[in-house]
Amino acid sequence: MASSATAPNSLSFFSSSLFLSSSHQIPKTYVSVSKLGSGRVSKPLSVASQLATLPIISFEGEKVGETYLDLKTAPDYTARSVVHRAIVTDLQNKRRGTASTLTRGEVRGGGIKPYSQKKTGNARRGSQRTPLRPGGGVVFGPRPKDWSIKINRKEKKLAISTAISSAASAEGGAIVVEEFGEKFEKPKTKDFLAAMKRWGLDPKEKAMFLMIDVDENVAKSSRNIGTLRMLTPRTLNLFDILNCDKLVLTPAAVEFLNARYGVDALEEEDEDDTEGSEEAEE
């Protein structure tokens, strides 16, 4: 009698295909990372390493090889909360907080009593700036406020790597396309749409391209496609990763992600922290 496996809960935050469970995922290897040389005793940061194999597609749409993404990810029991804190921080820090209203003490006018206290049949009124009258002050209205909140740098970095790793692990969630910046001799949206169809991308679905350098012709050819986001390492953000249905990388972008968010990057950070603590002790 075959036992049925129970699929883990989805970690999707939007209507995208990210954080979907996949039956062919490689088991994660958990490591505990703690800051060395620190006088405080804190709970170690639990980090997982997840390997995802991605197909490499040529400009003509043929599979020419494979590559891998080996990124740090948060464990299953904390991944949702880590990514949630990061996306809430990003969205809330975009709020300008400039909404403002005037109270009855700040509204212009109202210095004289509108009419006499008695003998008019109307309610008693001492000022036209009362909130009960049109044009008067506002009670408990919005005031300028600083909405910004803080998140730890390593936690935000872990949230981005977790989202990318989840997209890469999902079936059909991410592909790698050979460098195509020089393939477009002139800006033309029709040529870019044809290339997307060769790569197996639906123009009606949201796609996020991550490239190290975006050629001018590529940027102009893709900017009229409303469902497409063309990002670089400088503009990479968590919202666009979670909001897309397909993640498209270049070989150079894969190398950047492995160097920036991979396990080796984690070891380099620990070495830097250790060296800094040693210099402080000297």
Image (cartoon, grey):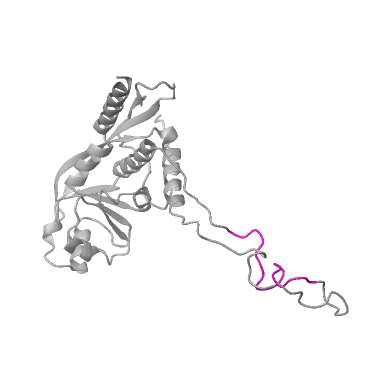
Give the left or right position of residue 242, taking residue 112 as reference. Answer: left
Residue 269 lies left or right of residue 130; in this view the side is left
Which residue reaches farthest right? Answer: 119
Q: Is residue 176 above or below residue 135?
A: above
Q: Is residue 43 left or right of residue 53?
A: right
Q: Quadrant of residue 70?
A: top left
User: Residue 190's x, y, as percent?
Assistant: 20, 68
Residue 224 position (above or below residue 180): below
| Position in image of residue 120 (x %, y %) | 85, 80
Residue extending farthest to the front is 111
Figure quadrant of residue 68: top left
Instruction: Name which residue lies at 34% across and 31% down.
Output: 48
Q: Is residue 263 magenta?
A: no
The residues colored magenta run 125-142
Q: How many numbered marks, from 0 up?
A: 0
Q: Is residue 150 visible?
A: yes
Residue 69 visible in the current orientation: no
Residue for point 76% across, 77% down: 114
In the image, farthest residue toward the bottom: 120
Q: Is residue 221 above or below residue 88?
A: below
Quarter placement of the C terminus: top left
- For this rendering, which residue is in front, 38 or 263? 38
The image shows residue 4 at horizontal and vertical percentages of 41, 33
Quadrant containing the N terminus in the rendered view: top left
Of residues 125 and 72, the one nearer the viewer is 125
User: Looking at the image, which residue is at 21% across and 42% down?
Assistant: 256
Residue 133 magenta-drawn? yes
Front residue of 115 and 221: 115
What percent of the width, then of the height, locates residue 40? 43, 22
Which of the pair 217/270 is nearer the observer? 270
